[in-house]
Every structure is written in C-alpha cells, then in structure tokens.
Image (spheres, grey):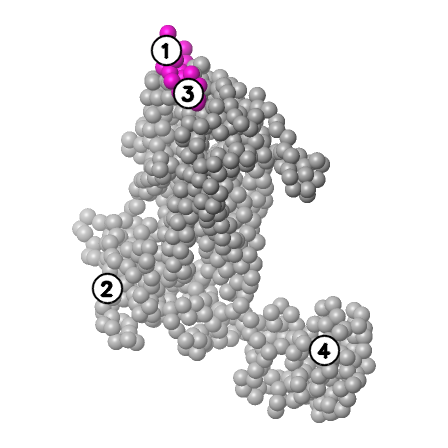
Amino acid sequence: MKLVKNIAIALTAVAGLASASFGSAAGKHPMQMEWSFDGAFGQFDMQSAQRGWQVYKQVCSACHSLKYFRFRNLTDLGYEEDMIKAWAAEYEVEGEVDDAGDETMRAARPEDAFPNPFPNENAARASNGGALPPDLSLIIKARHDGANYVYSLLNGYEDAPADSHVPAGKHYNPYFKGGAISMAPPLAEGIVDYEDGMAATPEQMAKDVVTFLTYVAEPKLVVRHHMGLEVLMFLGILTIILYFSMKKIWKPVKAGRNVYEDKK
Amino acid sequence: MSTINETIETEDGATRRDLLHVAAAGMGAVGAVMAVWPFIDQMNPAADTLALASVEVDLSAIGEGEAVVIKWRGKPVFVRHRTPAEIEAAREVPLDALVDKQTDAERVHEGHADWLVVMGVCTHLGCVPLGTKDGDDRGDFGGWFCPCHGSHYDTAGRIRKGPAPKNLEVPTYTFVTDTTLQIG
Amino acid sequence: MAEWNAAKPKNAVAAWVEERLPIISLVNNVVGSDTPTPRNLNYWWNFGSLAGLMLVVQIISGVVLAMHYTPHTALAFDSVERIMRDVNYGWLIRYMHANGASFFFIAVYIHIFRGFYYGSYKAPREVLWMLGVVIFLLMMATAFMGYVLPWGQMSFWGATVITNLFSAIPVVGESIVTLLWGGFSVDNPTLNRFFSLHYLLPFVIAGVVILHLWAKKISDSGNPLGIDVKSNADQIPFHPFYTIKDAFGAGVFFFVFAAFIFYMPNMLGHPDNYIPADPMVTPDSIVPEWYFLPYYAILRSITFDIGIPFTDIVFIPAKLLGVLAMFASILVWLFLPWLDTSKVRSGKFRPTFRWFYLFLVIDMFVLTIVGGKKPEGIWPMIGLIGTAYYFAHFLVILPLLGKIEKTLPLPESIANPVVKAAE
C-alpha cells in the first residue's frame, strides 16, 4: 500500500501548506465552540436554527441583508408552508410595473429573497455612520473559522483597553480586525422572546444565530455529509476489491514469470 | 488479453478468476452509472425555477367578455371571463362535431363556468393564438385563431378547424377565493 | 524505438472500423494488451493516469457548470450561489470542480517530481518531457482564469495582480495589460474573455495530452531503474497489469478526493472568495491558490534592480526581473534534458543527486510557505534564498553534478536486477 502512503504524504503536505499560508488573521483568535454541524456526522440543531431565524428576523435584519436566503428555504428548518407564506407576507417587495406605468409594491411570497433593509448601498452607509453592514448570507464561509468568529464577535465586546484608540461612534471588539467595529453590541439579555421559551441570553442568541447563518451559508451541508458517507463507503469497498483483483492479476509477474514472451 | 487469461486459468480455473474481477468491474460500472446521475439531474428545473411554478391571478379586474394573458412557466395562459352567450355556444356543440371530443363542462371548474383558463399555446406547433385582445381575429368559432397555420378554436378553447390535433390545454388551477385564481 | 502493433479485432464491426481507421490499434498500442511496458513500474507511475482522469473530471464538471454560470460582473457571483443552492446537485458539481483543480495539480506535481527523480526527461524522452511542461503551463493558465470566474474578492484581485505582471514588460507593457483587460481595469470584458479561454484551454490540454501519450509510445515508458528494456522478459503488457494497477490507484485517489469534496470542500479555497468582488477594496492579503504559491514567492522575492552599482543606470528593474524569474522558473524545465549532464537516468543510482533532489523538494515546500505569507520580517529573505537555490539547482548543480558524481553500478536488466560486478 505504498501508494496510499505516497498520497497521504502529499496531502498532509498540501493541507499543512494551505493552513500555513493563512497565518495572518488580524483579530484575536476566536473562541472555539462545539457546533451541531461540526464533523462528518454534523447536522443542524433544528431548534437552535429556528431560534436563530427569530434572532435574525428581530435583531440582525434591521441592518443586515440576507440576499441569497429565500423564504421558501425555511422549509429546510422544519417550518410549514402556511407559516412561511404568512412570514413572507409581512414584508413588501417590488412588484411589477402596473398598467399606468407606475412601480408597485406587493407582499413578499415564499419564492422571494429576504428583502434588504436598505434600498441601496449608499442608504445603508448613511444610516450606519458610513459603515456598510455586510450581507450575512455567506458570512460564515467568508471568514476564517466563520462560525466561531461570528460567535466570538457577537459576545466579544469589551471596554477598550487604555492603550487602544477607538474613534467616536465605534466600539471596541478584540475579535474584529483592528479592534474598532461600527456595529454596536447587538445582543442584550432578553431582546428576543423565544417562541420555545428558551432563555434569551446573549450567548444563547449568538449560538442560535450562528447555527441559522451556517445553514444559510451552506444549505446543503446535511445532504453533503450523508452522501459523503455513502460515497466513501462505496469507494472504500471498490478499492479493496480492486486491490485483491490487482494482486491476483499480478501474481505471475511477482512470481517472476515471463508473461510477455509467449506473445511474440 | 490472451496472455493473462491463459496464465490465470491454468493456475486457478476460470470461475475463481471471474468472480473477483467481475465484482470489481461490476462495482466500477455501477459506480460510474451512479456518478452520472447528478450530471444529468442538474439539467432538470432548479429549486428556484420550481418555486415560481405557481402564479396567482386577481379576477376582479376582468369584466365579462374580457380576457387576459398571464405568463406562467414562461408560457402564456389565457384567462377568459365568458359571457352567458359564449358559454351557451360552447355547450350547444354536439360532440360529433369535435376533433378532440370534450364537453365544455370538462374544461371548466364546476360553479365557475364563466371562467375559461387555457394554455395560450396552439397544439399544432406552439404558436400563440389570437383572440384575447379586443379587435383580435377570433376565428370562425368565436374563440381563438392561430395565425401560423390557421387553426380555429371555439369559446371552450376546443379545436374546430385547421391542422391542430388537440384542444387548447387546460392547466391545473384552483380558485383560492371567488376572485383569486391560482394557476399551477 | 517502439514498434507499432496492428490489432486484429475478432468482432466484425470492430474489424470493419479498424480497417478504415486504426483507432483500436491506437488505443491498443498506448494502453492496451499490445503495449509492452516495463514490469517494474512503482506506484509513483500511477500519477500520470490520475492526472489524465482529473482532466476528464474537470472537463465534464466544467461543461456542466457552464450550463448554469453567467459570465457577467453583475451576475457571476449570484449565478455561482444559485448553482450552490438551487441547481440539482449543483453544490456537488461545483465543489468537485473547485477541489478537482487542486487534485489535478497534486497528481501533476507528483508526476513531475517523479520525472525529476527518475530522470524521465533524458534521451530519448526529451520531447515527451517538453510536452509535459507545455501541459503544465496550459494548466496554470486555465486554473488562473477559472479562479477568476466566481468573481469573488480573490478572483478579482488575483486577476488584477497577475495581469499587472505584464506591465513590467518595457515599452509595450502597459498596452499589453490594457489589451488583456479590454478596458482600464479588470472588468466585464476581462471576465468574458477569461470564461471563453477557460472553456477552450482544457481541450487544448487534452490535445497536448494525446501528443504526450504518443511520444510516450514512441520513446517507451521509462522505469525506476532508468535502464532500457533489453528483452521481453523485462516487460509486461500494459493491459491488464497496469490498467488494474491504475484502477486501484484511482480508487485510493478518488477516496481522498471525495473526502475533500464532502467534508472539507472549502479548505483549499480562501474565505475572501465568498465576498463578492469589490474594485474599491483590496483584501488584507492577496494569496493565490496553493499550487501557485512557489512561483508567487519567486515573483516577490526579487526586490532589487539590476544595473551598474552606485549609479542610477538600471538595466532590469526589480518588477521586470521578478516577472522574468517567475516565468523562467518553469521554462527552465524545458532545458532540463540538457542541463542534467549525468549519463545515469535514475536517481536510485546517483547518491549525491538524491540529496540535492531532497533539497529541491524542501525548497519547493519552503517557497510555497513563503508565497502564502505577507512579505514582512524574515520572509522576503527566506524567499530570496529559496529562489536562489531553486535556480542554482537547475542551472549550476545539475550540470556540474553529472560531471563529477560517482554513480552506483547499474543492474544487468529489469527482469534480473543483479548489479553488474563493479569494475
């Protein structure tokens, strides 16, 4: 099985190099949490993801868009279609141009994306002291160690140390690159009334919203983990059979027999 | 091929050789076939396309005798608010006179006979028949007329004359309320 | 020189085709039962067929992705996200394609370094080797343009930095860059042409691969002992011996590949590429994909001009020198058959060469790490030393070593690897 060794060596090297090349994260190293979606058997904790949806809807969505998330995706989190329709209808989106040529607004439908809180980037900046609240659809994948990073950031607000310089209107957060973040601490005890009665501590809310956002960033994670197991098992068995098939075919060669000669 | 077959046959006999190699080849083939599926299935409608598969129509704005065209799944759907005279005309036709034998009642929802909903696609070669807008040529039977090859449809959307083989297709639809129609 | 064996298919249809177009002979003579192959190829020889398989995987998954991708700056990122979220199995196919690039490079790097060790570039296989270098260059171009297509931050800034390399060319540099961009910055015309070329080049690669296999047929496979085949006892038919061995190797390789696709799909990528391209904001550090890091390190290691010391006269400014060094670092491989003066092919019988080979491998790893670091502190110095050693290996060590090294005695034959009595 020298081949296995060769490949293993090569991959370890590549993996090592890939991680070595990302050595320059500027903020404080994020807290390492345990997540339901970690590991080969990881799945989304549905209860937590549902609570996270509530946190996003009631807190984050005031400033952050979620443009790749559609209301219909909520079926993946275990919601019924009627509920989804009702939630969607709470929001207005641009409708078609009417017969008089005027632009209209209509209630959102399940196939619509979650509406952006601001009409455009400039409006978003103007409302947020010049800073643009990033879209959160991919935030977990767009940051190193994204789940832990977002969790740490949400819980990481501190009083600024004496030697740091935090400009007016900004807040000190050591997990943020540079330490000064425009977002005010978003989570306060009890800011959300959880439907399932869970106590809404900042830690709990951060955990829930990270679970939700991880779902939004990687909606196929569960099916990917399942299919991966099947594929790896299949390839494993196939490779073992191929190995024995190879050993058998090679037997005369390994025995030193001249298998080519009689051909000529 | 000959070399290896001979070599192994003399050693182990044919059956044992077959089993292991056939298992390997068979499993490889099965794997290849399974791996092909995602590459084919990706061509099927995607989730966002399927999500748009139904559309709601507000009927209150369509007066008697009027018709509208709705875009559904990228194709036109005719929604016609029929007059009693049009319904009567459609119901009078004997089945023998039809190419594609369907009664008018089969083509509308019970209790909503004044609403005719049909795909605006001629069953001949897929053109869009005229007859929805005011002033359109409605053909010899007061329904629709396809200008491409001259198919005439009646007030129930049934083919009466011309090359089209079938009546205009009726899509699946439901009345959400008396004034709201959901197609799809 | 390998002889050509005409196939005589038993099947009537196959025979009919064969008479008119000897396609069956062609396959049979390259990977068939009529292909005499040295009996002693080790597992390092598996990576050629693995690279070929990865090319097939990339072409198939790429063609399918192109059915859903939109090459427009306003829509590219969205269309990729649509593939990931809405297209049936889109996530699988995209992760396959993105990681497939890395695994293609893994296979090809091992294939190349196998060639370095066993002297696969030496007579009569010079053309075979050079075609391989051409394939590698085409792969680099293809991979680079492919990385631009998702139109994330790394896509955009990678494209900006690499196309700007050409501005180092004296006089016409700026015009060339404008030509490459089709505008005054990397923008929609750039994205469109990169998409077009990214779709085209893999088929060019496939064409050169056929030439590569043809050259392999003509000059015969090398082997770990580096000695020529002397009799039929030294060889075995390619099929079924190496087909089954390649199939087994593919099983192992695909197992690891699948582990990445399903469990670490983003590990080899960069998080910044999940941020849509923004021409106004450069990311903290622009890092190419891992397989480009050594060359990126060589590019950045040169920070000095070449000119007359203590005057203002500059012959080659640092920027140009860096670019030249980067291209030269691969082009030098083309001359390897003549730079390596040793009469002995295989590193197995070259005790001193083996050490230098090891140093080269280490040097490549060091350069890879340097390429991923910000050019601060000690890193530029390490990069410069690594670059100097890299060129020294090919331009100084190999030519001299062949003249002075005392090689070990070569075996009698492949089938009978008893070492000839030392003279």
Q: Nearer the viewer, residue B68 or C285?
A: B68
Task: Check chain identity for marks 2 and 3: say if they share one.
Answer: no
Disc 3 and disc 4: Cα gap in Å? 83 Å
Note whether residue C60 is visible: yes
Task: Check chain identity for marks 3 and 1: say if they share one.
Answer: yes
Q: What amino acid does circle 4 point to?
A: Asn
Name the subunit of mark 2: A
Q: Secondary structure at mark 2?
A: helix
Q: What amino acid does circle 3 point to?
A: Asn
Give residue B152's position: percent from left, percent from top.
79, 78
Give residue C159's position: percent from left, percent from top.
48, 41
CA neighbours of label 3 inside 10 A, class few (<14), some (14 to 19), many (20+): few
The residue furthest left is A162
Magenta span dominant secondary structure = loop
* Residue drawn at the location 34% of the way across and 25% of the way down: C358
Which mark is drawn over residue B54?
A: none
Q: Secondary structure at mark 4?
A: loop
Residue topped by disc 1: C421
**Magenta part of the protein: which range?**
C395-423
Q: What amino acid does circle 1 point to?
A: Ala
Q: What amino acid does circle 2 point to?
A: Glu
CA neighbours of label 1 inside 10 A, class few (<14), some (14 to 19), many (20+): few
* Residue drawn at the location 42% of the way across and 34% of the way down: A251
Quadrant containing the N terminus of chain B is top right
Disc 1 and disc 2: Cα gap in Å? 77 Å
* Residue C328 against residue A90 in the figure, above or below: above
Name the subunit of mark 3: C
Residue topped by disc 2: A203
Residue topped by disc 3: C416
Disc 2 and disc 3: Cα gap in Å? 71 Å
Disc 4 and disc 2: Cα gap in Å? 63 Å
